[in-house]
Amino acid sequence: MKLDIQPQPKGASGVFFIPLEIATMPTIHMDSSVSQTATRAVMNGGVLACTKTSDKDVYSHSIWATESNIRQFTMHEGDSIVIPPGSSVTIWIFRTQPGKSTWTMDFELKEKAA
């Protein structure tokens, strides 16, 4: 699998990998004070939904990538995207007016059964 590696968006911190073997929880909680980025393999495909944000101006850039395709989506609370089988998904969280505050965003990843 060859991916075109792009620079991280401005304001994003280091990548947070979740090993597939221990990632049994369907909820992904992101907190800007810990990390603003999460990456996960989605082998059988599924749906990623943004279920909750700490404020109205919190949003994410979510990218899924396969061997032959890359798609980027801007997500707000209540939005969802379909992730194709064999993808990796990366999520960055941002805030329009961050100041010195911290912010959170929760996602639910419903993976298809193998």
Image (cartoon, grey):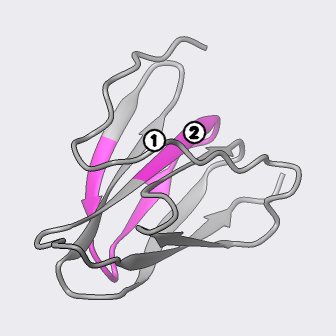
Left or right relative to 86: residue 23: right
Q: Mark 1 sits on what residue?
A: 64
> Real-space Cα distance between discs 2 and 1?
6 Å
Residue at image position (53%, 20%) is 67
Q: Which residue does the image show at 43% across and 53% down from the upper left?
A: 91
Residue topped by disc 2: 88
Please name the amino acid that badge 2 sits on: Ser
> On screen, 57 above or below 35?
below
Residue 34 lies, in percent from the top left, at: 52, 64
The magenta segment is: 72-91
Q: Quadrant of the N terminus?
A: top right
* Contact check, label 2 and label 1, Cβ < 8 Å: yes
- Which badge, 2 or 1, comes first in the chain's sequence? 1
Mark 2 lies on a secondary structure that is strand
How far from the left and from the top, in percent, is residue 27? 64, 75
Q: Nearer the viewer, residue 100 or 67?
A: 100
Classify 32 as above or below 77.
above
In front of the other: 18 or 86:
18
Q: Residue furthest left?
A: 97
Task: Give the dominant element type of the magenta stretch: helix, strand or loop.
Answer: strand
Number of dots carrying numbers: 2
Residue located at (44% from left, 69% from top): 33
**Residue 76 among those drawn in magenta:** yes
